[in-house]
Amino acid sequence: MDKIKVFPIIITKNEDDTDFPYFVEIPDIDGMTEGKSIVDAIEMAKDYLVTYSLKDQLPESNTELPEVKDGAIAMLVSVRVSK
């Protein structure tokens, strides 16, 4: 049966990177990815979480937003997983 899980992500923009300027951290699983835009970064984080769930069990959902540095964005993303 599919489950929906929720996790915080942190997005930081790197002005020096023109290809993938949005760096994404997924603290609950020590994951990292990047995106070409904010929307792409969010989708990449979701994809990372789903891919991670195929080989390892995701932790329980976490709806606590982490503290972030100036200019970073913390938000929650939800994913549907089969485990």
Image (spheres, helix red, strand yellow):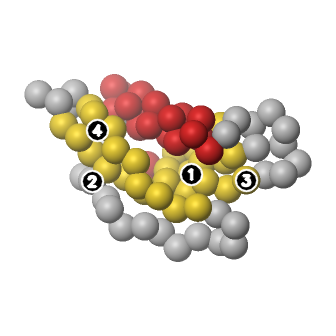
Q: CA distance from mark 1 to mark 2?
A: 16 Å
Asked if the residues shown at circle 3 and circle 4 are in contact, with their CB atoms under 8 angstroms apart, the answer is no
Looking at the figure, which quarter contains the N terminus? top left
Residue depicted at 51% across the width and 35% down the height? 43
Helix, strand or loop at mark 2 = loop
Asked if the residues shown at circle 3 and circle 2 are in contact, with their CB atoms under 8 angstroms apart, the answer is no
Say which label, 3 or 1, has the lower sequence index: 3
Residue depicted at 59% across the width and 70% down the height? 68
In the image, residue 71 sits, relative to residue 3, either above or below, namely below
Q: Which residue is mark 4?
A: 57
Asked whether the viewer can see residue 27, the reply is no
- Quadrant location of residue 39? top right
For discs 3 and 2, the disc positioned in front in the rendered view: 3
Going by the numbered disc 3, the residue's amino acid type is: Lys
Say which label, 3 or 2, has the lower sequence index: 3
Q: CA distance from mark 1 to mark 4?
A: 18 Å
